[in-house]
C-alpha cells in the first residue's frame, strides 16, 4: 500500500493507474485493481479519532463505535474498487454536507466539553473536502471510460434500537431517479434478500423501511453525475453484538463472500438495462 497526497491519488486516477493507497493524513483508503464501472464505498467504516480531541470528547469510545459502521469495508474488500473512510464520523461525518459534518451534539447527547476551536473544525473539514475531491475524480473517470457507473454505498445500522421488526438489509432510494433505476433497485433488494447467513440469522430485504437514502455521499454523486447510480445499502448489525462490541467474523466473512458474487452480477445487469 502506498501513502499518497490527494493530488497524487487524483493524478493516478486520471492516468488510469492501478494502485492501493492511504491518504497521506491517513483519513481514507482507495484501492483500484481494475477500472471497472462500479465502486464499493464504506464511508462510515472508520474508527480513528485524532488525539487532540480525546480529552474534550464526552462520548466514550464504545458510544462512537456504536454509531459507526464497523466491518463494512471488509464486506466489500475483495471488489476491484474500494473507497473507505478511516476516521470516525464523530470527528467529521463524510455522509453529511460540510456545514453539518462536524457535530456539536451526536444522537441527542452533547459531544464536546467545550466548543471546538476554529483550527480543529477546519482540520476536520479539510479532510472532508479532500475525500470529495477524490470521489469527484474517480466517478468522472469511470463515467468517461464506461459512460455510466454504479456505486455500492455500504452502511450498517443498530437494529436493537428499533421497537419493531426491521429488515436485515435496507435500501434507501428517495434521492435517486426511481423512474429510471427502480428495476435495478428491486433487483438488488431481491439479491440481498437471498443471501444465506450462518446460525439461521434472519434474512430480509426492504426498500425505504428504516432509512431512506438521505446521505450526502449519495446526494453528492447523484447531483454531479447523471449516469451514475448510488445504491445506499444498509445491513443491520446482526454481524456483531452491538451492545458489547463483539464482532462475529464468520458472519462478516459470509457476507463478503456472497457480495463478491452478487455485486458483479448486479453491475452487469445495470450495464445491460440502463
Image: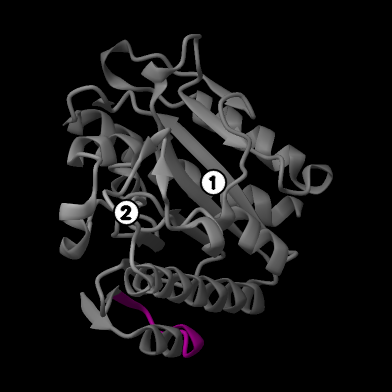
Can you identify the residue that label 1 sits on?
265
On screen, residue 242 versus residue 170, left or right, reads left
Residue furthest right as drawn: 179
| Residue at the spot 29% in from the left edge and 54% down from the top edge | 114
| Residue 274 picture location, percent across and down | 76, 55
Q: Indicate whether 111 appears above or below 114.
A: above
Q: Which residues are magenta?
A: 13-20
Q: Which mark is residue 51?
A: none
| Residue 19: in magenta span | yes
Mark 1 Cα shell of 10 Å, populated few (<14), some (14-19), many (≥20): few
Q: Is residue 79 magenta?
A: no
Tell me how far mark 2 sits from mark 1, CA to CA: 17 Å
Residue 261 percent coordinates (x, y)? 43, 43
Residue at 75% over, 64% down: 226
Could you tell me residue 32's position as x and y percent? 38, 71
Q: Quadrant of residue 80?
A: bottom left
Which residue is identified by label 2?
77
Amino acid at each position: 500500500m502506498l501513502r499518497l497526497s490527494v493530488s497524487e491519488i487524483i493524478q493516478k486516477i486520471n492516468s488510469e493507474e492501478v494502485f492501493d493507497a492511504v491518504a497521506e493524513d491517513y483519513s481514507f483508503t482507495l484501492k483500484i485493481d481494475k477500472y471497472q464501472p462500479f465502486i464499493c464505498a464504506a464511508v462510515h467504516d472508520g474508527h480513528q479519532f485524532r488525539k487532540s480531541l480525546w480529552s474534550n470528547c464526552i462520548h466514550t469510545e464504545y458510544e462512537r463505535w456504536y454509531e459507526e459502521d464497523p466491518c463494512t469495508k471488509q464486506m466489500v474488500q475483495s471488489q476491484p474498487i474500494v473507497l473507505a473512510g478511516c476516521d470516525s464520523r464523530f470527528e467529521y461525518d463524510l455522509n453529511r454536507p460540510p456545514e453539518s459534518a462536524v457535530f456539536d451534539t451526536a444522537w441527542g447527547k452533547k459531544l464536546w466539553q467545550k466548543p471546538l476551536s476554529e483550527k480543529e473544525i477546519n482540520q476536520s473539514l479539510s479532510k472532508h473536502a479532500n475525500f470529495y475531491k477524490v470521489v469527484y475524480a474517480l466517478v468522472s473517470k469511470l463515467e468517461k471510460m464506461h459512460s455510466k457507473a454504479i456505486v455500492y454505498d455500504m452502511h450498517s445500522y443498530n437494529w436493537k434500537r428499533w421497537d419493531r421488526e426491521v429488515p436485515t438489509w435496507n435500501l434507501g432510494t428517495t434521492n435517486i431517479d426511481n423512474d429510471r433505476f427502480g428495476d435495478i433497485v428491486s433487483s438488488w433488494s431481491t439479491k440481498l434478500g437471498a443471501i444465506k447467513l450462518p446460525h439461521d440469522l434472519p434474512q430480509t430485504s426492504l426498500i425505504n423501511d428504516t432509512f431512506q437514502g438521505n446521505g450526502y455521499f449519495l446526494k453528492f454523486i447523484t447531483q454531479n453525475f447523471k449516469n451514475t447510480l448510488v445504491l445506499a445499502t444498509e445491513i443491520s448489525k446482526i454481524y456483531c453484538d452491538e451492545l458489547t462490541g463483539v464482532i462475529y467474523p464468520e458472519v462478516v466473512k459470509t457476507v463478503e463472500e456472497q457480495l463478491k458474487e452478487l455485486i458483479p452480477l448486479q453491475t452487469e445487469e445495470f450495464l445491460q438495462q440502463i
